[in-house]
Amino acid sequence: MILRPTAVFTGTVVLCALSCQSEKDSYVVLHTDVNCDVPRVYQLRVTVINPGTPGFQKVIPDAASAELGFPNSIVLILASSHSGSVQVQVDALNSKFTIVGSGAVRGQIVVGGRIDLSVQLAALSNAPGSSGSVDGGPSGDVDGGTTGTSELGAAGSGVPFVQVAVGKESTCAIRSDSSLWCWGGNSNNQLLLPGTSNRLTPVAVGAGALWNQVACGQSHSCGISNQTALSCWGNNGTGQLGAVPASAGGQADVPGGPWQSVATGLYHTCAIKQDGTLWCWGDNTDGTLGTGDTNPSSVPVQVTGQGWSQVSTNYLHTCAVETDGTLWCWGLNANLEAGTTSNFTWSPAQIGGTTWKQVTTGLYHTCAIKTDGALWCWGGNISGQLGSDSISVLPTSQTSDPVQVTGTTWQSVSAGESHTCAIMLDGTLWCWGSNTSGQLGDNTLDSKSTPVAVGTFGQTWAMVAAGVTHTCALATGGALWCWGDNSAGQLGIGSKQPSEIPTLVAQ
């Protein structure tokens, strides 16, 4: 035990679920202490899991200004709780809002009753020093030589995020000051960081540029900076970077432009120029470049048509929307994800209708929103990723005809490998499909064939990005939350602990 003559937080914290009911409140009196090896603690992040209710999460105090003292006591008032088991996870955060210790405790609660729980916080084996958390090597050690992009700084700037992108095991996001931050797996330098060590918390990259968009593929990433310049980094085994990097692990400046937006796939990349033309490059085995053949290209090649407004390419097929509201898809069509019944779709094939506004592509499925707010999905439905009970959930279930997801007020959608998440106009977030790693964020590991609500923690959502087995979303106001698989640190919480509910990224 450490007793520190500093600010001690002892108070009451109200943690509400999606809606606070009129039932009697339940109380958890949480007593916390720290081991001697835990560095200085400025905040506690408390996560409460009570089966049958959305997960609760809160940082205490809301604004960290001084080191906390221990032992410490906190009263948690749980509205909407259920009688039965309750699990409390406590993470200790340092002044840079990086996890330096953690502990967990379980108990049994009765609605309207009170329980006292004690938890001892122990230092993480990979507890970071002042330079942030790095997976592998001593605290603060960054694997890599003098080439490549230098590591600029660790999480803790407090500047809100405005955009997020997720890959297989990596995540990148842009803050409101136009700085770019990345974390998670770095085996192919997809984080734009030297060496190949994972990063468990956000690290600033891409110095000297003002970033306005980032996209993460399976093992490479791309971003647009200074409004129109496009660059890519990471794996270039199939020419998906669009150019050769100036140095090992560095950025490749994509020729052409000025560029408007970019989308990264498994082994290829597509981007739209400001004149509305669409260009793709990289692997083309399945016709993913949309050029009418299967010839690969390590430099951008133009897709037929002009007036493109949005493009999505996640795995082995590509879809894009034109300014006239028409929607087109091409590439792999093994599960009818390209929206046609043809065996080969090497050129853009039109999906019915002329009122489409946004499209997203998964591994074997596609989803798109029309201007009236209706959400439609098609392709394979092996995990329920189409979000409709009108089609069975079987390995052989597939459709080339769009099926409507319940609801008519959708504003944005993101398809992961085998799951889908979307935000309604009221700011609520919903996910469905595969949930083997908790990527649906509903506090279970059960897959769902129709939308389930993601816990809000009192917030509305502005943007969501679904990856292979993890998901990240931006809350209104700029707080970034991630959940699901965390085997490479892609949740950005300072550890490799997975989460079945949204967990706050080190801010």
Image (cartoon, rainbow, N blue to C red):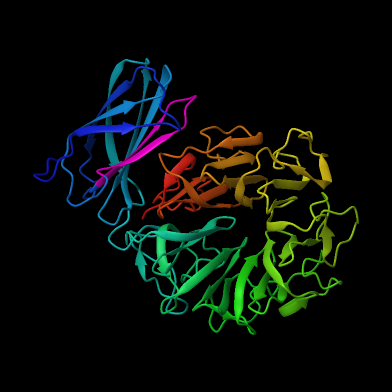
Q: Residue 359 location in percent, x, y?
A: 69, 57
Q: Give the answer, above or below, for where 409 lies relative to 360.
A: above
Q: Residue furthest front?
A: 372
Q: How many marks?
A: 0
Q: Position of residue 258 (x, y in %)?
A: 60, 82
Left-right relation of 373 to 9: right
Can residue 434 be spotted in the picture? Answer: no
Does 127 sit above or below residue 216?
above
The correct choice, above or below, for 3 with respect to 462 in the image is above
Relative to the observer, which residue lies in front, 391 or 298?
A: 391
- The residue lying furthest to the left in this view is 5
Residue sitting at 79 percent across and 74 percent down? 305
- By secondary structure, the bulk of the magenta-drawn segment is best described as strand
Q: Judge whether residue 201 is colored magenta.
A: no
Residue drawn where x is 23% and y is 40% of the image? 35
Please state which of residues 158 and 327 is positioned toward the viewer in this rendering: 327
Which residue is at 53% across, 45% downward? 485
Residue 46 within the segment the image draws in magenta:
yes
Q: Which picture quadrant has residue 12?
A: top left
- Is 435 left, or right, of 28 in this rendering? right
Q: Position of residue 179 (x, y in %)?
A: 41, 69
Please identify the quarter of the rendering in which residue 356 is found.
bottom right
Residue 271 in view (yes/no): yes
Quadrant showing the N terminus: top left
Q: Which residues are magenta?
A: 43-61
Quadrant assignment for the C terminus: bottom left
Q: Position of residue 95 (x, y in %)?
A: 25, 55
Residue visible at 11% across and 46% down in the picture: 6
Would you identify the image quadrant in which residue 389 lies? Answer: top right
